[in-house]
Amino acid sequence: MPSSMSNFSELLAEQVAAILIAPLEATSVVMRTGMRVFTAGGQPIRVPKLIDFSVLSGASTTGASPTYGAWRGENELIGEDEPDFDELVLLPSSLRSIKIIHRISAELARHSVIDITNAIRDALVRRVALEWDHVAIRGDGSQNTPVGLLHMVGRQTASKAWSVDSIHDTVGLLLAANASPGRWIMHPSNFVNARKFKSETTGQYLLQPDPQEGNAYRLAGYPVLVTTLMPTNRVLLLDPSAVAIGRDLDTSVVIDSSRYLDYDQVALRVVLRMDIGALLPSAIVDLTLTS
């Protein structure tokens, strides 16, 4: 971009603030969970799924010991096993991408006190991150888009009133799947309500934050990520290592001052192609909150 594009003389500071503040877009919650990210160069990614040890032969709620069948004695023949490894396919060729083109006038870019083109570019990147979070959490797979966490087949589901007991019960479901609880994902209102749980006898708050951690978002000892993209009646607890993200193309931003030359406009294009899937679906607990 020519340097003149970032020299401002006429745009008011209030207008700049409106451009920067108006979107009020959050950063990607899904990418902050610590899920595994696999990168591809345009080809589908095939990842072996994790073995669900909680359903091995002999494992049951009666306390019976699971039979693994791998123990052998000295000089004993080692039998051949043919394990049936399922696989997760990410980024199939039919998967669509997030693509956005935004236009601004050359005057706006040229007369800005800041590099307004970069400012709008950053806003567009946040917009794409918000769209990615939306589909990664709530996507139903329609129109060749990813299936989000709330629709993944094989996830554990439960329906309970929101309480300290249901918080611990949700942790218990994940532990029963031999998974490691790593992140809660919920609407901000549910986290605030959880922090307000009080004892019926003493009136004291039941969830006391650790003074050494300040206002860290944690429930039952596990970090909480809040987003308004989550339904207010749903809460997720998951093991991030059991969920995979496929990345074909990271967020790409292209600035072009020639595409709309006849309009004297600058074009900004943002493209992102990513996918998400569960390596161990039972390591995702989807809690529906009842009244």
Image (spheres, helix red, strand yellow):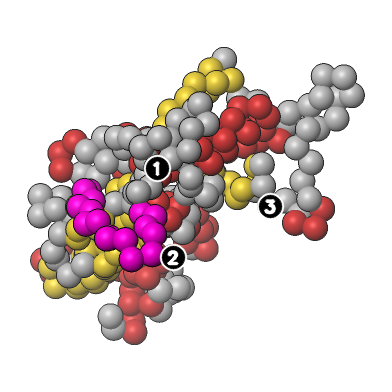
Going 43% across and 55% down the picture, which residue do you hit? Answer: 241
Tell me the CA gap for discs 3 and 2.
39 Å
Tell me the CA gap for discs 2 and 1.
72 Å
Q: Secondary structure at mark 3?
A: loop
In screen coordinates, is 206 left or right of 181? right
In screen coordinates, is 113 left or right of 269? right
Q: Considering only vertical position in the picture, is 220 above or below 60?
A: below
Amino acid type, label 3: Ala
Q: Where in the figure is residue 284, as x and y percent of width and height?
A: 43, 40
- In terms of sequence position, does the residue under pointer 2 or pointer 1 come before the other? 2
Dot 3 alpha-carbon crowd within 10 angstroms: few under 14, some 14 to 19, many 20 or more = few
- Residue closer to the observer: 131 or 290: 290
Task: Identify the disc placed on residue 216.
Answer: 3
Amino acid type, label 2: Leu
Q: Considering only vertical position in the picture, is 32 above or below 148?
A: below
- In terms of sequence position, does the residue under pointer 1 or pointer 3 come before the other? 1
Q: Where in the figure is residue 276, as x and y percent of width and height?
A: 30, 50
Amino acid type, label 1: Thr
Q: Where in the figure is residue 261, as x and y percent of width and height?
A: 13, 69
Q: Secondary structure at mark 1?
A: loop
Tell me the CA gap for discs 1 and 3.
42 Å
Which residue lies under the disc numbered 1? 67
- Residue closer to the observer: 259 or 205: 205
In screen coordinates, is 18 left or right of 199? left
- In terms of sequence position, does the residue under pointer 3 or pointer 2 come before the other? 2
Let me know if residue 251 is in the magenta part: no
Task: Identify the disc placed on residue 11.
Answer: 2
Going 60% across and 50% down the picture, which residue do you hit? Answer: 223
* Magenta-drawn segment: 70-87
Image quarter in which the N terminus is found: bottom left
- Residue 14 visible to an observer of this rendering: yes
